[in-house]
Image (tube, helix red, strand yellow):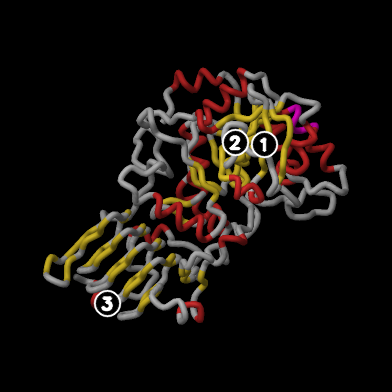
Amino acid sequence: MVESGQVQRMNRRVLAMVLAGGKGTRLFPLTKDQSKPAVAFAGKYRIVDFVLSNLVNSGVYSTYVLTQFKSQSLLQHLRDAWQFGSLLPSQFIVPVPAQMRSPGETWYQGTADAIFQNLELIEQAAPDLVLVFSADHVYRMNVREMIEFHNQKEADVTVAAFPMDGSLASEFGVIETTAEGRIVRFHEKNPNAPTLPDNPDMVFASMGNYIFSPEILEQELYADAAKENSSHDFGKDILPGLLERANVFAYDFRQNRIPGDPPDTRPYWRDVGTIDAFYDANMDLRAVTPDLNLYNRQWPLGSIRELNPPAKFVFDQDNRRGHALDSIISSGCIISGALVKNSVLGRSVRVHSGAVVEDSVVFDNCDIGPNAKVRKAILDTNVTVREGDTIGYDLEKDPKSYYISECGVVVVEGNRSSVEVTTLQLLNPELGRRRRKSDNP
């Protein structure tokens, strides 16, 4: 966690507004019954945990999480994992469902409208700075450094930006800047957006993280709300209109450094908005030294609550040896005479004798039966793979039962009748799902 002296150097009251209401349609079917920020990642985390961890580790303790679509799973996770229990009124992480405060009593019409409908929360907090951050991305960020950059530039608005391959320009807002970092133009999802002066293959993409002075933010949101033809989006409407009237700077995320990381660690940021991007980001974690470091104790990810027992590997016999190679195995898992290779397993996963799991992402509470085989797949929460079944081995048969991504990743929908793995299930994984006699090694 951040040291007290480092927090004091920020010398400003900071309020964070986290946008966590998107549908995540490109991540279907993982978002069939939940919002994108609630989707599991790296075994034990949710996507929303990354932005919240970055804020808390950076000394930002006042955060509203704006929810909207299919929010029950996300609300339950915030309740169970992110309660400070502090007596200080300035330390909170509070979910805020859509309040229908627009004149037409509508859902949020865009990212800017989401903040506009909750301006009273900002007015009540009376902060010196307002952070508007997205909950949709996987990354670690020392937000203190972005705030210090904002202060040094005496900026009205600062936008975090990161170089991305030019072929992805149509998926991001692309920024043009001067040598000192002042933004001179935005290109919203334009495939012909200009590349970086020093690298013709890369564009400077907005990360969807902004710092505003409260006065500028309130002024622009009221003006935007009065425009009938506005899409009420920060990237499309608010920020381009500010360039000639305010000091708007880009913070180069390549400069960001995390306490406790080796000096040569490269900043990591990924938009996991599609099945293939989500799969690849999980697979990145298998590297001996991954760019996304989950093991830095000075910069912990997720909440500190852990209710599962340790992972266990059982049986050491020929053709029945429980082991895992180049994989992440979360707490509560039992690998019973099975092989797990190049995979990421969530909490309380059971893999039975003779089963093989390769190049796959397995969410919490899945049960993979004896002699079953799973390859290049994503298994959603509570999936049961029956004895001897195969997934990912027959791309002619699999599409009849499962969703297949453009790159051939097989996605098996889970059973979310209980919405999430409850606290009671975490304490006792035997509850809430059927067990075979073969579960007991």
Of circles 3 and 1, which is in front? Answer: 1
Q: Secondary structure beneath disc 1?
A: strand
Residue 269 bears which disc, if any? Answer: none
Query: In the rendered image, which residue does mark 2 sit on?
Result: 161
**Viewer-nearest residue: 423 or 110:** 110
Residue 371 bears which disc, if any? Answer: 3
C-alpha gap between disc 1 and disc 2: 8 Å
| Residue under the point 49% across and 64% down | 407
Relative vertical location of residue 254 with respect to residue 357 in this rendering, above or below? above
Sequence order check, earlier mark of 3 and 2: 2
| Residue under the point 41% across and 62% down | 363
Relative vertical location of residue 140 with respect to residue 413 in this rendering, above or below? above
Residue 64 appears in the figure: no
Residue 188: quadrant of the picture = top right
Q: Which quarter of the rendered picture does the C terminus lie within?
A: bottom left
**Viewer-nearest residue: 270 or 316:** 270
| Residue under the point 66% across and 50% down | 170
**Viewer-nearest residue: 286 or 198:** 198
Sequence order check, earlier mark of 1 and 2: 2
Prevailing SS of the magenta stretch: helix
Where is residue 397 shown, x and y percent of the image? 46, 81
C-alpha gap between disc 3 and disc 1: 52 Å
Residue 198: quadrant of the picture = top right
Q: Amino acid at mark 2?
A: Ala
Relative vertical location of residue 312 with respect to residue 192 in this rendering, above or below? below
Query: In the rendered image, which residue does mark 1 sit on?
Result: 175
Badge 3 crowding class, 10 Å Cα cut-off, few under 14, some 14 to 19, many 20 or more, is: some
Q: Which residues are magenta?
A: 215-219
